Amino acid sequence: MRKKFLKNGIIAMMAVCGLAFVSCSEDNDEGMKSYKLTVSYSLPSDVEASNVEELKLILGSTAKNDTLSLDANPKEIELPQGQYKVTVTGKVADEAKAYLSGSTSVDLYANTPVTVNLQKVMQSSLIFKTIHNSGSKQYYMHESYFEIVNNSDEVQYLDNLILTAPTGNQQTANAWQANGYEDLYACGQGSVVAFPGNGHDYPLQPGESVLIANDATNHKLAYGEDASQAADYASCPDLSNADWEIYLDYNANDVDYDAPNLKTIFYNNQYMFAFGLGVSGRSYVLAKLPEGMTPEAYAALESSVMYEPGTSSTTMTYLVIPSKYVLDAVDIYDPETENHYPTFLPQDDATGVKGNPMYSAKCIRRKVTKIENGRPYYQDTNNSAADFLRDQPLTPGETPTSVDE
């Protein structure tokens, strides 16, 4: 259940001897006085108190840090005198990548009130690491793949994460953009898929990635019994080790290989035989719905499905996903054209990235900015042109070992 907080909340905590900051044996040296610290916070003007969750208070001193969960009940903090950094963090409930953060410093040598002004910060925890959509063998469309990485320092959950490819020709405004729906992304040119789970079934540790295959098989061997074609498939990736597969259960021609399946939550073309086709360019989205809303329930809402605006067409519907639900968006466009019309709002992807040539057996990979204890951290500025490298070899499931200059 979502917690509700006052617009200006008073936060206080009564410390006990077992709390790290007020250890009776370590902090309360003889002659050291303790004082009450009352912490208040203020929200940005565009954030409603009822739309805030996961508020935490982080108290820092020269020696220790302690993180405390917050609720709406006023409490008091009694701490040994000294200097403290007071940080408050939280999450905007209905915006996938909107967080709240603010901090201030305080000299605690008397009972002291302090106010932390929270700012909205846009950051994504789950992002695309690698996308291969350009193909490896002419007219062979089954070996595309995606890698998703947890780029944060906390455990994230894949449960109900949506993967989709919005409509649009990337050279002119699409029907939604042309008719005033710039913040809605129309999805379903084929299908919209999502991870299964009930909320905490599929954890992804900090720095870990998952590999999602259109078809989870070794595509180097797709020539079957005709060995004369082996060389034609030699550049295709081996996806038999994929963590997940996009199996289109509504299409009788799709094959269910030996990998857990993402679930199809929407489709508008039963003849589409693979997910997110677009060897000359395509855009992709990771989206997360508000807590308590499942992808199936969202797709069943009348307000979530639209016909193409500005036309009289009633033959094909699309699942529309608002920008505020987007965790990550990558606009990959045709490398042969300079006439690129953005698929996304700048807040989701400021500049698209040129794709690789068709059937080049190359992918795009996100840049590595640093490596700590063997773990890569990836660049994420919501600008694909700056964040991704083109012309990268197909190495599904592998972890980069060096920083990209």
Image (cartoon, helix red, strand yellow):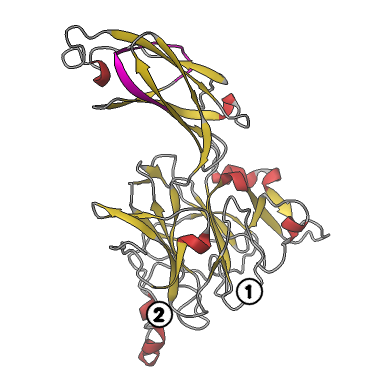
Could you tell me if residue 392 is visible in this image? yes
- Using the image as rendered, state which of residue 266 and residue 32 is in the foreground: 32
The residue type indicated by label 1 comes to: Glu
Q: Position of residue 2 (x, y in %)?
A: 51, 27
Q: Dot 2 lies on which element?
A: loop
The dot on residue 184 is none
Question: Dots 2 and 1: beta carbons under 8 Å?
Answer: no
Q: Position of residue 381 (x, y in %)?
A: 49, 53
In the picture provided, is 353 more to the left or to the right than 210?
right
Magenta residues, start to end: 71-87
In magenta segment, residue 74: yes
Residue drawn 64% across and 45% down? 300
Q: Quadrant of residue 272?
A: bottom right
Q: Dot 1 lies on which element?
A: loop
Q: Count how many numbered circles sit on residues in the image.
A: 2
Q: Position of residue 100 (x, y in %)?
A: 50, 33
Q: Nearer the viewer, mark 2 or mark 1?
A: 1
Q: Position of residue 43 (x, y in %)?
A: 56, 26
Q: Which residue is mark 1?
A: 338
**Vertical placement of residue 387 versus 82, above or below:** below
Residue drawn 29% across and 13% down? 81
Q: Quadrant of residue 82?
A: top left
In the picture provided, is 248 more to the left or to the right than 305?
left
**CA–CA distance in space, label 2 to label 1:** 35 Å
Q: Which residue is mark 2?
A: 222
Screen quadrant of the C terminus? bottom left
